[in-house]
Amino acid sequence: MSKISLASELKERGYIYQYSTDNLEDIFEDKRVIYLGVDPNADSIHVGHLVTYMLAYHLVQAGHKMILLVGGATALIGDPSGKDAERPFQDESEVAKNALALTKQIESLLKIDNIEMVNNLDWFSEINVMEFLREVGKHFTVNNMIRKESVSKRIQSENGISFTEFAYTLLQGYDYFHLNQEKNCDLQIGGSDQWGNIVSGIELIRRKKSQEVYGITVPLLLDKNTGKKFGKSEGNAIWLDPEKTSPYVFYQFWLNIDDANVVDYLKLFSILSLEDIGALETEIKNYPEQRKAQKTLAYEVTKFVHGENLAESVKKISEIMFSGEGLAALSDEEKELLLKEAPSYNVSEDMSLVDVLVESGLASSKRESREFIENGAVSLNNDKIVDTMFRLNPELTRNSLAILKRGKKNKIILSFK
């Protein structure tokens, strides 16, 4: 099979939404110095951001140079893009702490030696207001600025927009100009909400240097079934930081992706070849009940983010939680990891099952607990329990552990003291 061009592969994978030239192929005729920015509004990125970093990974693998910009200065202002109201100002020390955490996280995530990390606070701290207005402000008209989607929506809203946020696009535009001057940067990538800011940089470089540079955005991902933004589970963001979202919960998020979305997400979030993904798509059509694509997605993304060893461990834990088998064969290290990663609850000998269901969060009251038991919805190590007077017995455990289930999806590890 003949190798497709980089532009064609990026399109096929779903990374391309907007680009600043008529022909995407033109952008990749030459090797580029690419810039991707992130404002340190938090100390971790979440999976909603991950698609842009996967695009960055593929571009670096294709031989392009990548600059990752942490917005230590712009985070102090706040980007109005996609926001209905102005963000509260962040403390400078908090921004600095977040910037350091993000730098370490992204370096670890992309695992690539030739990625340069910069912080725009380094140059904005040396620019005075008069210089900025003369050298940057004069190249932007208010007429064009208020037509940008991020600005026009806010102007029409009851919250309005402050001058601080209104000027944000000039700051990000200057970032691109500065990196073009100092690093020969000629391509910026970002989320679709950043298009207006990317264009500001392209226009500034064109006006000051008469040079053509480029921009690409990735699409905003929506769940095909719900129409909601991708990246949350039960209303909570799925973070890449293992202290915010455990690798087990991270793995489960991907494992629970449905058939309508899983192929698209394999293309976007895994580094598997398109041929391998095509084979998994056939598996979905022929054997959907096996969920091979979801298992592959969960393993591959967890491996990319958290490493192969942890991916193997949470895969094993997930299989144990699903089947209820394998507790007895766990090593001490695996047992410790299971209790750390999977939902667990410490119990004492002779506790009533009714109490355990309530205290572990599997039932909201003793009455509900009894109803679950009487209706056959509760099992211990795959054995259905229908006796509301049932009490725990260590002899029923495997390796001092047991799996308590309520229904098909609600499971918890019981650890006997």
Image (spheres, grey):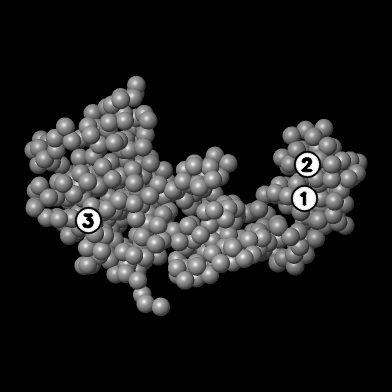
Q: Are marks 3 and 1 in contact (CB under 8 Å)?
A: no
What's the CA distance linking mark 1 and mark 2? 9 Å
Q: What's the residue type where badge 3 is placed?
A: Asp
Where is residue 59, by image quadrant? bottom left
**Front disc: 3 or 2:** 3
Disc nearer the start of the sequence (3/2): 3
In the depicted structure, whether residue 328 falls above or below residue 223: below
Residue to which mark 1 is pinned: 404
Disc 3 crowd, CA 10 A, few/some/many (<14, 14-19, 20+) = few
Quadrant showing the N terminus: bottom left
Q: How many residues crowd around disc 1 within 10 Å: few (fewer than 14), some, or many (20 or more)?
A: many
Q: Viewed as shown, does residue 77 lie left or right of 125?
A: right
Residue at 75 percent across and 46 percent down: it is 407
The one nearer the camera, 203 or 223, is 223
- What amino acid type is highlighted by mark number 1? Leu
Dot 2: within a 10 Å radius of its alpha carbon, few (fewer than 14), some, or many (20 or more) residues? many
Type of amino acid under label 2:
Leu
375 displayed left or right of 37: right
- Residue at 36 percent across and 29 percent down: it is 85
Secondary structure under tag 1 reads: strand
The disc label shown at residue 129, or none: none
Contact check, label 1 and label 2, Cβ < 8 Å: yes
Where's residue 315, x and y in %? Answer: 62, 63
Please provide percent x and percent y for residue 353.
84, 43
N-terminal label among 3 and 1: 3
Residue 7 appears in view: yes
Sequence order check, earlier mark of 1 and 2: 2
Q: Which residue is mark 2?
A: 357
Residue placed furthest toward the top = 158
Which residue position holds label 3? 22
Q: Residue 401 at what x, y percent from top left?
A: 77, 56
